[in-house]
Image (cartoon, rainbow, N blue to C red):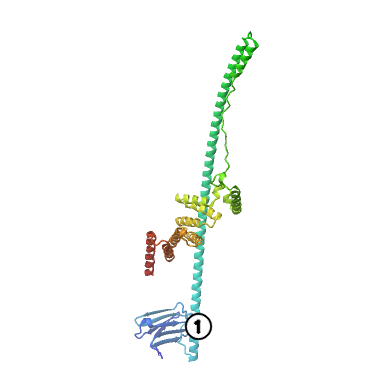
Amino acid sequence: MPLLVSDYNWQQTKTAVFISVPLRGVCVRDADVFCTENYLKVNFSPFLFEVFLYAPIDDENSKAKIGNDTIVFTLYKKEAAMWETLSVSVDKEMMQRIREKSILQAQKRAKEATEAKATARREDQKYALNVMMKIEEEERKKIEDMKEKERIKATKELEAWKECQRKAEEQKRIQREEKFCEQGKKIEEERHKLKHKSLTKISSSRNLATKGRDSENIFLEKLKEDSIPAPRSIGSIKINFTPRVFPTALRESQVAEEEEWLHKQAEARRALNTDIPELFDLKEEEKNPEWLKDKGNKLFATENYLAAINAYNLAIRLNNKIPLLYLNRAACHLKLKNLHKAIEDSSKALELLTPPVPDNANGRMKAYIRRGTAFCQLELYIEGLQDYEAALKIDPSNKIVQNDAEKIRKIIQGTEVKS
């Protein structure tokens, strides 16, 4: 049975009530205060202070200050008026109803505060998500603009190269025509000289008319032998070879089987490429995913990561079952700090590198390392350490991976100590 405190002091103004309750040597931490608009209770075992207030107060703005073995309450009245007494006189049944009502009000208010906090938290999360989506959209638009600029630049360079090639071909054609004209003039001069020589011989034969028919015929035969026709003009013969897709010679190949295979490959490419407008301007060999992969690797070596991503994207659209395309594109995304995309491409490469066999061990290790690196740059160190440990299971003797995994462990341990 608690002991009721009766030696308290109280004062009032028209707007506030001031109550001073002694703690009687009880520790401050052991004092339990409960206050509603009509009820005030302070429980500090074995003592109890309980007041059924004369009029309602603003319990949200009211204050309690604990110190020097005393609790001082500052209670603000809802209506400005002087109270006749601090506590109203009620029977036990009314006291119990007031206590229960106060507890229900406090529970309701706590529930409303919890719901308000949850609503505010959801609104904050929604706002943060919208901001992230906006940032990603701006980043994507920026990347698209950069890609478009690169495409326009590459198109202009290609057009300039084609124009240079056309001018060079035109210059060669003009030089060939001039050379042919000079050769034609030389041949015409030779013909003119031969014609003049033959006319001179004919005039000499007419002066020998006194000789007989036989001698004249002999002279004419000699003249015909001397009349040598002009040499033909020089030229070039163009030889066209049958185009071959297979490296073997035609005499060593099975023509029927090769033609059937080529026909099926062409049909498959046409069926696959009908909805890809980027392939319309490419040559036939440039529509090969392997060729595009090599092109992307060369661009990556020159640190042109955006162009490399474009090459890998087109190759993936042609064939999305090649894990190296996703693996190489993940490396480009890491360089450009597109960490979420690097994680997606590394995960896709791991899906394709199944079942785990010794032949694909190197690719699986690279995928784990690149995904782990992206996780660490996102400060998700636990996920990053898991990927590095998976890489170490594939190659336990790799010192570089061992050192990186140890650094991540130290970072995690330091984070846990701080928290």
Q: Mark 1 points at which residue?
A: 104
| Closest to the observer, 298 or 197 | 197
x, y (%) of residue 297?
A: 47, 51
321 lies left or right of 5: right
- Whether residue 91 appears in this view of the structure is no
Circle 1: residue type = Leu
Question: Where is residue 176 drawn, in percent x and y?
Answer: 55, 31
Instruction: From the top left corner, tell me how far across and down residue 220 is, in percent.
Output: 62, 15
Q: Is residue 409 visible?
A: yes
Q: Mark 1 packing: few (<14 Cα in 10 Å), some, or many (20+)? A: few
Q: Is residue 90 above or below residue 269?
A: below
Relative to the observer, which residue lies in front, 40 or 357? Answer: 357
Is 202 placed above or below 249 here?
Answer: above
* 327 is higher (above) or lower (below) than 152: below
Q: In which quarter of the image is residue 388?
A: bottom left
Extreme residue in the right direction: 213
Q: Quadrant of residue 166?
A: top right
SS label for mark 1 = helix
> x, y (%) of residue 279?
57, 50
Give the residue at x 47% y 49%.
Answer: 298
